[in-house]
Image (tube, rainbow, N blue to C red):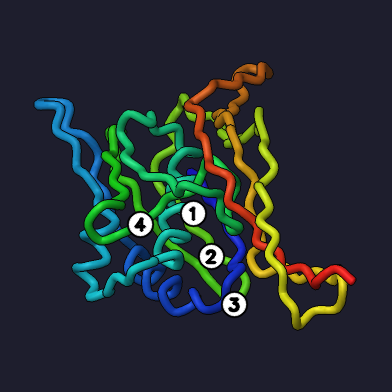
Amino acid sequence: ISSYSTPITDFKDNKSIVQAAKALNGFLVMGSDFNNRKYKEFSFVNRMKEKGISFEKTNEGLSQVASTLYAALLKTGIDVDYIYRKKHNAIVEYIEPGLDVEISEKEGDFTFKNPFDFPIAVFTEYDDRNITVYILGSKGNGYSKKEIETRVVQKIEPPVLRTVNYDLKPLEEKVVISGKPGIEVEVYRVSEENGKINSDLLYIDSYEAVESIVQVGPKR
């Protein structure tokens, strides 16, 4: 019923991406029980622990897989009230702002409940360039294809800190850390029904700007 792919931009994360993708592949989340309104909940962190995957100080490989899963889930039409997700403070390279998930063992879990009256299955596919998450389930009579659209409504250029490096030629510049802009982004779910395009605002996310550090050669 949906899928989403993200590019692997940092190859040092390959190992953890593969581990997380394998841990998710074939996982089944049961649907709601309408007799007593119970919902089965999925926890990304618990799933990783069950599969023996260790957590580090930073877990960007795991975060990328969780982000890809999150974007695929949004495309199914699940209400965001059934999803808990912690975003990054600053934008990341592998997914659009507004769709990222930050994973950490104690403070950054990603959970969701399946509100549908049918189970959904999670399958993954990966290679050296991309990770793809597929969500399988029942489309039903009222199914309509959905897409996720992000719109940047505000962008703040990163501040630049310049320091003198006497090993450089006069006025030569060397970028030590590339900054990131501050972003405010709106996230929409777009669907088509009876030839009419519907665009529903889901939420608004904000990201902090990250300072650039540039070394400059001394003046003559």
Residue identified by numbered label 1: 68
Horizontal side, residue 33 vs residue 171: left or right = left
Proximity of marks 1 and 2: CB atoms separated by less than 8 Å: yes
Instruction: Name the amino acid, label 2.
Output: Ile
Q: Secondary structure at mark 1?
A: helix
Instruction: Name the residue tied to disc 3.
Output: 128
Amino acid bearing label 3: Asp
Q: Nearer the viewer, mark 3 or mark 4?
A: 4
| Side (left or right) of 90 relative to 58 | right
Q: Indicate the position of residue 89 as horizontal and vertical percent values.
A: 46, 47
Which x, y percent locates residue 183? Answer: 60, 38
Q: Position of residue 21 (x, y in %)?
A: 41, 68
> How many residues crowd mark 4 within 10 Å: few (<14), some (14–19), many (20+)?
many
- Residue 100 lies, in percent from the top left, at 48, 48
Tell me if label 1 and label 3 are in contact, CB under 8 Å.
no
Residue 115, quarter of picture: top left
* Dot 4: element: loop
Viewport quadrant of the C terminus: bottom right
In the picture, the disc for residue 131 is: 2
* Distance between the alpha carbons at the discs numbered 2 and 4: 17 Å
First in sequence, mark 3 or 4: give its number: 4
Badge 1 or badge 3: first in the primary sequence: 1
